[in-house]
Amino acid sequence: MKVKHKTQARLIKTRRLAKPCLRRATPTLISTNRYILNKHSILVRKLLKRASFLSQDDLKTRIFDFINYFNQTMAKPLKWTYTGKVLAI
């Protein structure tokens, strides 16, 4: 294989040495990303900030308890503002 650039050689070497890894699909829609980031920021602000956990099981239990509490007391439906109209350019 003839290599033209150093970066190509580095990429080929990296691909050969790289261990197989699990790839996870991430949402491609912006609205989905915003939804996930919104929920993550609520979780961090209301539960994880200044918190300490004894184990991963403790963390998992507290997160699920918070999700149940949040859904019963604070959750509101999202208000979609997209009307489907094309912007005039």
Image (tube, rainbow, N blue to C red):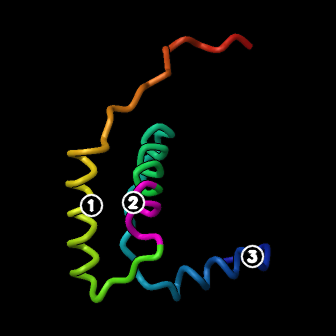
Q: Circles 1 and 2: CB distance less than 8 Å?
A: yes
Left or right for 7, reference 17? right
Q: Which residue carries the number 1 mark? A: 66
Mark-to-mark CA distance, 3 and 2: 41 Å
Chain-order first, disc 3 or disc 2? 3
Kindly identify the residue that appears in the image at 20 percent across and 45 percent down: 72
Q: Which residue carries the number 2 mark? A: 43
Which kind of residue does numbered mark 3 sit on?
Answer: Thr
Q: Nearer the viewer, mark 3 or mark 1?
A: 1
Chain-order first, disc 1 or disc 2? 2
Q: Which residue carries the number 3 mark? A: 7
Q: Circles 3 and 1: CB distance less than 8 Å?
A: no
Q: Residues within 10 Å of mark 1 (few under 14, many from 20)?
A: some
Point out residue 89 in the picture as x, y percentages from the top left corner.
74, 14
Kindly identify the residue that appears in the image at 30 percent across and 41 percent down: 75
Screen quadrant of the N terminus: bottom right
Which kind of residue does numbered mark 1 sit on?
Answer: Phe
Label 1: which secondary element: helix
In the image, the segment drawn in magenta is 42-49
Chain-order first, disc 3 or disc 1? 3
Kindly identify the residue that appears in the image at 71 percent across and 74 percent down: 8
Point out residue 45 in the picture as x, y percentages from the top left corner.
47, 61
Which kind of residue does numbered mark 2 sit on?
Answer: Leu
Mark-to-mark CA distance, 3 and 1: 48 Å
Mark-to-mark CA distance, 1 and 2: 8 Å
For the residue pair 48 and 36, the one nearer the viewer reads as 48
